[in-house]
Amino acid sequence: MTAKISTRKFDVVIVGAGGSGMRASLQLARAGLNVAVLSKVFPTRSHTVAAQGGIGASLGNMSEDNWHYHFYDTVKGSDWLGDQDAIEFMCREAPKVVYELEHFGMPFDRNADGTIYQRPFGGHTANYGEKPVQRACAAADRTGHALLHTLYQQNVKARTQFFVEWMALDIIRDAEGDAVGVTALEMETGEVHILHAKTVLLATGGAGRIFAASTNAFINTGDGLGMAARAGIPLEDMEFWQFHPTGVAGAGVLLTEGCRGEGAILRNANGERFMERYAPTLKDLAPRDFVSRSMDQEIKEGRGCGPNKDYILLDMTHLGAETIAKRLPSVQEIGHNFANVDITKEPIPVVPTIHYQMGGIPTNVHGQVVVPKNGKHNDIINGLYAVGECSCVSVHGANRLGTNSLLDLLVFGRAAGNHIVDFNLKTKSHKDLPKDAADRTLARLARLDGTTSGEYAQDVANDIRSAMQQHAGVFRTQAGMDEGVTKIAALRERVANLELKDKSKVFNTARVEALEVENLIEAAQATMVSAAARKECRGAHTVYDYEHPADHPTAPLGRDDANWMKHTLWYSEGSRLDYKPVNLKPMTVDTVPPKVRTF
Ligand SMILES: Cc1cc2nc3c(=O)[nH]c(=O)nc-3n(C[C@H](O)[C@H](O)[C@H](O)COP(=O)(O)OP(=O)(O)OC[C@H]3O[C@@H](n4cnc5c(N)ncnc54)[C@H](O)[C@@H]3O)c2cc1C
């Protein structure tokens, strides 16, 4: 079968043209490698474009700061599930990648002295938790937009080859398990191609569309996760999903944490600044898991706003029209367009909304995909890398701090690029494609093309989303998660029975959607099964059944370090779980020992 398929050869194939994919491709193209970047959409429409608030780096332009503080905050923010070697690497590299971006032409906001403008952000502090720090490097509230356009232009200059509206379908692994390419669907023609490569890098972004209410773009269907899961690679820590405190109620569109960085305040139905009660030091700028839980608690206790008491108000009226126009122009537009609110005059209704996956494809600090093998916890898969939101290094652990994702894209996109350059210069030739290179993909497509009955992909996708919303929310219960596991298993059977009614070739979006649902189900099942198995509360995984530590009533409910300070690994085959230890040993500094997390 495979012989008939068009095959192209590159040094490196990158799946994904968001911030992480394009930071990696830039490094490779500049080194003279032949690089192909595939994207389902035009590169600058990747979800990175929607990032608003900023990039974390301890430049210390506006308040005293250094990377040790950033390191401490990130470990604490991760609720001690982040690997401290990777966190140290990221925080130390941060100023370098931001200055590099500045030299690429990124239009950051400026201070009067010409340095990059930095705003406060949740969980980022000076002097180890003492007070908020100004660490988020920002271009108004359009930081991701500025970042993505800068990287795209640099890539055009470096002659990166883009394959726009090409959807990668499966990873090709040879008999030794090495990655040697991907299969992809050219959406315009409906043709399937093999892209043969010395190295494959996945940069497909998050799977936020497994939930019903999400700040994520519609393309965020977890394709890289699905590709990895089908290729026998486990997914790490998928139970940890971040709810962003301030999605516009009813619309899901994000209002950046930069609003609170600029001084916005959350208020309940009594007009009270309730975060003072939950996080006396950082208040509205506590980390996201904390703030989302506190908001949900206010709503549950009857202090929600509006006729149904089901949202919280974000108040920016005291910031002044001038600051809002200068620092938060998009937020002002979003308020007007999605809530019919003039944020300079009245507060805007918000609810915690799914935003970011902390878990993903397991990697090391070079971006190499690692799996348990040969008696090692982290054995590399030759030729396979993953960076950005689809990967789990793990720097975010159980809860990501705002601004640390854009940073993660830059640091690990660059690091993976550098590692691949070294590796590719040494390996001169491509490994052979296996005879069955495209068989899995062709079988998936043939099944869809052969259907005469079955369900419509979007109906099944919607049921996946509502099951996830119901069973894996801000507050979880053991019984609820167990029920969710059963529901998702039943949904997997329905995914196997999707029908493709329109079998045409040219730009058939129904085929693309059906293929995406096959990825959604992998991400959803990984999340549900991993969550139900974790019998503690940590970071964004909050389960009612596990009690508060008696001496810390405001701390997150019980974290169980003795039994659960470990990473989850979920395998698609048999929906099996495994675990590996957290690395508490940084590269050069002392460990941050676990303690109760208060703010
Ligand atoms: C509204 C919003 C605001 C945010 N604000 C911030 C912020 O201020 N600071 C911060 O640090 N983080 C922020 N985040 C998080 C951060 O923006 C994302 O985690 C990050 O941009 C993801 O980048 P990425 O490179 O991993 O993937 P993305 O930017 O999501 O790009 C994924 C790419 O993969 C491609 N792709 C996917 N599947 C396939 C396939 N099968 N075949 C081919 N191509 C494929 C897509 O076309 C796209 O090009 C925000 C997120 C959202 C949703």
Image: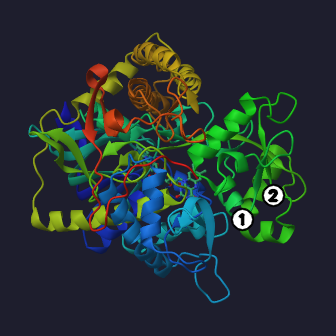
> How far apart are labels 2 and 1 at the CA level?
9 Å
Element on which disc 1 rests? loop
In the rendered view, tell whether residue 472 sits above or below residue 176: above
Report the residue marked by disc 1: 262
Is the distance from the Cβ of mark 2 to the nearest ligand 1 atom less than 8 Å?
no
Marks 2 & 1, CB-CB < 8 Å contact: yes
| Rendered location of residue 538, percent (x, y) | 46, 38
In the displayed orientation, state which residue is furthest to the front.
551
- Residue located 15% across and 44% down the image: 178
On screen, residue 494 versus residue 299, left or right, reads left
Element on which disc 2 rests? loop
Q: For residue 9, which quarter of the picture? A: bottom left
Say what amino acid the circle numbered 2 marks.
Answer: Met
| Rendered location of residue 444, percent (x, y) | 33, 25
Report the residue marked by disc 2: 316
Mark 2 or mark 1: name the one nearer the start of the chain.
1
On screen, residue 182 versus residue 73, left or right, reads left
| Rendered location of residue 19, percent (x, y) | 46, 60
- Between 427 and 81, the one lying in front of the other is 81
